[in-house]
Amino acid sequence: MEPLFTPEQLAEIHAYHQPYYIRAAVEPFVRLALLLLLLGVLVQPFYRLATAAAAGLERRLGFLRTAPVSRAFFSAMDRLWGEPGWGAAVIFALFTDLFVTLVYLPVDVWFSYTLEHRHGMSTQTPGTFAWDLLKGRLIAAFAIAALVIGLFGLARRLRHWWLVLGVPVALMLLVSSALDPYRGRIYFDQKPLAEGPVRERITGLMKQADIAFADVMVEETSVASRRLQAYFAGQGPTRTIVLNDVILKELSEDEVLAAVAHEAGHVQEPKWPARIASSLALVALLFALDRLLRLSASRGWFGTHRFADIRSLPLLSLLFFFVMVTARPISGAFSREREREADRYALRLTGDVDAFRRMLVKAARVNKMNPEPPRWVVLKGMSHPPIGERLASLPPP
Ligand SMILES: [Zn+2]
């Protein structure tokens, strides 16, 4: 078998990945330092700024409080929050997020635009790149506002808020993956795969695997990236097989089928243990938040006077940071095991080892995957086993 990469290609791949490894090693410490800076120094000035901004808005937009339609919104928010000040709380949270975003912005732009272009991975123009960035920030801002109002608002009103919030949110998470097919469309256009041999063979393969699906869609990601990509979104009646336009261009029919067979392997995974574990983890996390908020209020940390003061928000980010740092290596290990199992499943389903190997080789070449990333990078939480390992574990031709 010919080698996966020529020495020149391998050198380029290493040049491409090296900055990512440096970032992976440094980022946790930078994030920690930033959170400590927020907590130790910036909480009070940001809070004063947010209060002043909220007062300014109130002066200018106060008429909305009595206008016919917006009145209902304002009185609902006042009731939810239980006292004045929800505007300042939301603005404080948005300021904090904006600050962190701006600190990371140069590095983020360098990685996702400059480096990707340097290695021919991205096809985005500055305009589309900026627009995607903005879209992401707007979605995040909306989520932050909802979190502040929902979490802090509820925590102020109910003693067992962590249970009242945790149980329904955990239940929502269980069904939310049914909505996945619509999430992808925020960033890319999708259209149904045209009738023809590829669609026919995918339909046949899914019948053989006994997996029901709604449609096969083509996601037009080539406007942004040169990467190959395939995934299943949704569940049961909403399950959609999504192939990007690059995969259809780069892979032969057999190889597309191999990729779909791998994704079908993920459908067969036992989902309930992970779902139940993450639901329990969520309720436990909210309980820990409750304890932390109570401690912060009783000690008067960061100028907080009461339970669920918005100034304790960065403290919650700190807790979340530690949870993620410890959870990622564990969830990565589980994910890599699921990927190995999906590979084995795909081989059983199609019986075509050769096409599967070619599919992995092309994916590695087009996506410029490092066949042997440093071990610590894998253990830190890579979702897939290194491509070299996946190829090596295939049965010999
Ligand atoms: Zn997979």
Image (tube, grey):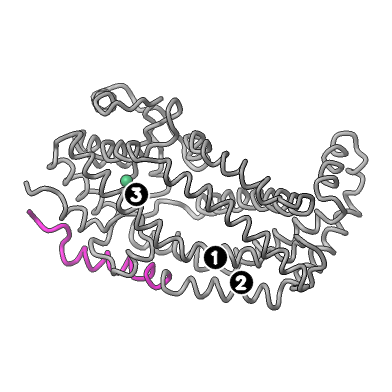
Q: Is label 3's Cβ within 8 Å of ligand 1?
A: no
Indicate which label's residue lies in the foreground, 1 or 3: 1
| In the displayed structure image, the side of residue 165 where residue 377 appears, left or right | left
State how far apart marks 3 and 2 are (Cα): 35 Å
| In the displayed structure image, the side of residue 284 where residue 231 appears, left or right | left
Going 43% across and 47% down the picture, which residue do you hit? 274
Going 41% across and 25% down the picture, which residue do you hit? 214
141 vs 298, nearest the viewer: 298
Per the picture, the main secondary structure of the magenta-coloured stretch is helix
Residue 3 to residue 27: above or below: above
Q: Secondary structure at mark 2?
A: helix
> Residue 245's image quarter?
top left
Amino acid tagged 2: Leu
Indicate which label's residue lies in the foreground, 2 or 1: 1
- The percent coordinates of residue 333 (x first, y second) are 34, 58
Which residue is labeled 3 in the image? Answer: 226
209 vs 130, nearest the viewer: 209
> Residue 270's image quarter?
top left
Going 83% across and 41% down the picture, which residue do you hit? 76
> Residue 386's image quarter?
bottom left
Nearer-N-terminus badge (1/3): 3
Circle 2 packing at 10 Å, graded few (<14), some (14-19), many (20+), is: some
- The percent coordinates of residue 188 (x first, y second) are 47, 40
Q: Give yes or no for contact between labels 2 and 1 (Cβ–Cβ under 8 Å).
A: yes
Going 68% across and 45% down the picture, which residue do you hit? 164
Which residue is labeled 2 in the image? Answer: 35
Residue 27 to residue 146: above or below: below
Circle 1 packing at 10 Å, graded few (<14), some (14-19), many (20+), is: some
Residue 343 to residue 306: above or below: above
Q: Secondary structure at mark 3?
A: loop
On residue 321, the disc is 1
Q: What residue span does the magenta drawing correspond to? A: 1-23
